[in-house]
Amino acid sequence: MTPFELVEPVSLKEAIALIDPDDPEVRPIAGGTALMLMMKAGVFRPRRLVSLRKLGDAFTRIAAAPSGELTIGALTPMSTVEYSPDVLRHAPVIGRTMLRLSNVRVRNVATVGGALAHGDPHMDLPPVLIALGATVKIAGLAAERSLAVEDLLIGYYETALAKNELITEIRIPVQGAARTVYFKVTAGTADDWPALGVAVSLVAEGSNVKSARIVVSAATSKATRLIAAEKALIGKTADDKTFKSVADAAVEEADIIADLRGSASYKRELLRVYAVRALRAAVQQSGGPH
């Protein structure tokens, strides 16, 4: 690994000012679990890292509004999110997802905002946050803006962040009657990178699906909402016939890619099977027919 300068600003304004958008050798670092590996491999050779770890408690807090809306600071470690009573109460799917998200050593260091800014399509948290309808708050030199997580991720390791913008917090809206599940398929150990991730969030009244979000990841170049598959589900009877039709629509819609964890044809069949399983699980949680 090549030598680099480490600077540790104590304010958000100072941190943003230190990130030169015209200098690719200057990079922000949060938990650093992914960036340091890439530096060791020679993928990135920064001359300066701008550490965000001293920006203050405002960026590592988790707060729940009386309505149930969650706000999570971007520098909050994954393990803190995993055990947060507020998260477990208002978005329990996140706690369940953390159990198989890498390993405890990584979760103790990796941050929520860093995971999103990294843009890795194999990450477990982005598809879950998209299914929950989450947004991110982004700060730059000029102004702040908000963006849906599904719009933040634009390609393979690509996000909509400008080079001198930082994610400051994640907001998860009130879930109400929605129930969300996440299924991942790994080729190795249970906490390995997934060959496929599927997140489903839906509201069902009796046997009828009122609303739905379906997200695929790992088998695609970015975590992606499957709008056509959602339309094939909303207003329909929540049964296996419908679920299989929705799974077929998901396979048709998703732009599946091959990698070391499986061929495109293999991943399409995984999606066909696990979309049905995720839909069944979500309906059972929502009190629909078992």
Image (spheres, rainbow, N blue to C red):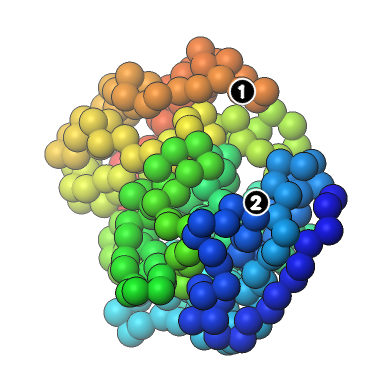
Residue 144, by quadrant, is: bottom left
Question: Could you tell me which residue is drawn at 32 percent across and 24 percent down?
Answer: 253
Q: Is residue 213 visible?
A: yes
Please tell me how crowded label 2 is: few (under 14), some (14-19), or many (20+) other residues with Cα within 10 Å: many
Q: Is residue 290 visible?
A: no
The residue where tag 1 is placed is 259
Residue 241, percent from left and from top: 28, 23
Q: In the image, is residue 218 above or below residue 167?
A: above
Q: Position of residue 96 (x, y in %)?
A: 57, 56
Which residue is located at x 21 percent, y 43 percent?
209
Q: In the image, is 255 to the left or to the right of 10?
A: left
Q: Is residue 80 left or right of residue 90?
A: right
Up-down relation of residue 79 to residue 194 (above or below): below
Residue at position x 62%, y 74% in the image: 52
In front of the other: 147 or 5? 5
81 left or right, relative to 142:
right
Is disc 1 surrounded by few (<14), some (14 to 19) or many (20+) residues within 10 Å?
few
In which quadrant will I find the C terminus? top left
Which three-letter amino acid code belongs to the residue tagged 1? Asp
- SS of the residue at dot 1? loop
- Mark 2: amino acid: Leu
Reading the chain from its start, which is encountered first: label 1 or label 2?
A: 2
Question: Residue 193's image quarter?
Answer: top right
Give the camera-side residue of 216 and 94: 216
Image quadrant assignment for residue 53: bottom right
